[in-house]
Image (cartoon, grey):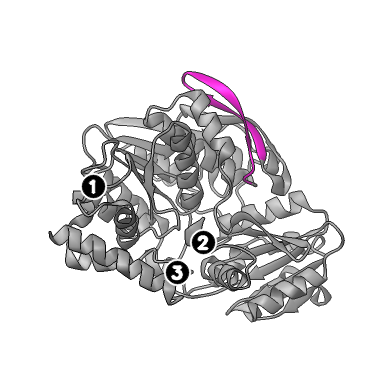
Amino acid sequence: MRDAAAILAGRLAARASRALGAGGGTTVPGRVALALAPGLIGRLVARLPGGVVLVSGTNGKTTTARLLDGVLAAAGRTAVHNRAGANLLPGIASALVERAGLDGRPRAEVGLFEVDEFALPAAVEATRPLVVVLLNLFRDQLDRYGEIDIIAERWARVLAALPPGATVVANADDPMVADVAATWAGRCLLFGLDDAPDRGGARTLEHAADARYCYRCGVLYEYGLVALGHMGHYRCPRCGRARPAPAVRARTVRLRGADGAFFTLVLPDGEVAISTALPGLYNVYDATAAAAGALALGADVATIARGLAATAPAFGRGERVALDGREALFLLAKNPAGFNAVLRTVLDAEAAPVVLIAINDLAADGRDISWLWDVDFEVLRDRARAVVVSGLRAEDMALRLKYAGVPASCVTVERDPLRALEAGRARLGDGERLYVLPTYTAMLDLRDRLARQGYLRGFWKQ
């Protein structure tokens, strides 16, 4: 009776939130339901016949979960999924409430939830997952999380609490994640990349890389290949600890700028050519992670290929928006490693791009924006035709561009998001697109304003 009342109250809260324009009803319903029926998440997921999959990491959670959802759909399996990216416990509860009947039975087979990296221990305790996908660890929101070592230690402890039959899917190319996965005695599926074309086979870490040292002996790693941030093919010259061989990997990667990528997906039982509409090398990592997660759930090679190919970009993450005859491409960027990867994607796609950078410093972004000085904005100095800066910290972003050597004549400061979009559109030539690089809340604000004008749908509807 209590659970039924909590589910009903949560649904009513979702309707009220959307009707009042207070949000998409992705968090409040879960808060209401959990207040009325503590422990509701555990009771609902216990009735999912296919168990629960959790996806966590600094970057790529929303995209990886969406790709995995696409593979499940290709296999004819239904999932209850927090698609809107509400990745704390109330967001998980909201997704369950939306798909559950008043009898407390979710109308789905599998629970698929992206989880904030700091909230993973609470999510594991609440859901007792069958599969946990660990993507990466990058410096992000230091005022909330502290250094990535803290997250790694939490993850290592939480793996010890997993059910005995669980599978850990982990990134072999991230030394910290691979170290965490090595503490798990159960089944472990590792994923990684064999090559990284947008770095040209680089062997030197970018200055913003986070995990430079072997955590066993404190010596700098040597890299045979640097892919993204500190991820790649690493080896400690003192103790010999090295990147473990991944069971699922992407090779012969060919990037198509903003239009996606081709690669060969290699799995234990075969390989298949993949074409994805998701731009950037970071999304090749996400697709490979999703493939490994699907393999852990029993999907075959052909089903994985169909699901990956059919998945469109998530809101704000490679999303294309038509703006009165011009196209805006949204590429979320929220920390140094991610921003550098997005900048490479933009410059690979366009010889002289027009870019809108929107920086906020709200709680969901992280209050400390000193990380902007670790992003390689210098790459825009001789390439960008125009840069519009917007958001709550527009002036800080303009200052960073000044020190990066971007000419003042190329930079426009416009704090109002819609006027900033218009300023960017005005600099476009025929057939050109505007590249929008926002932090998280800046992206939601821009999308909300565009949704109100009918250019796109609310993020919770996608």
The span from disc 3 to disc 1 (Cα, nearest Å) is 32 Å
In the rendered structure, which segment of residues is drawn in magenta?
261-278
What residue is rendered at 48% in x and 54% in y? 138
Of callouts 3 and 1, which one flags the residue occurring earlier in the amino acid sequence? Answer: 1
Examine the structure image and report whether residue 70 is included in the region drawn in magenta.
Answer: no
Q: Is residue 47 left or right of residue 430?
A: left
Most common SS among magenta residues? strand
Q: Amino acid at mark 1?
A: Arg
* Label 3 crowd (10 A; few <14 / some 14-19 / many >=20): few
Secondary structure type for disc 3: loop
For the N terminus, give its image quadrant.
bottom left
- Where is residue 144 drawn, in percent x and y? 39, 68
Q: Which residue is mark 1?
A: 105
Residue lying farthest to the top in this orientation? 269
Q: Amino acid at mark 2?
A: Phe
- Where is residue 446 drawn, in percent x and y? 60, 71
Query: Residue 189's quadrant in the figure?
Result: top left
* Viewer-proximal residue among 60 and 455: 455
The span from disc 2 to disc 1 (Cα, nearest Å) is 26 Å
Task: From this view, report whether residue 208 is shown above or below residue 203.
Answer: below
- Find residue 364 and name its label: 3
The span from disc 2 to disc 3 (Cα, nearest Å) is 16 Å
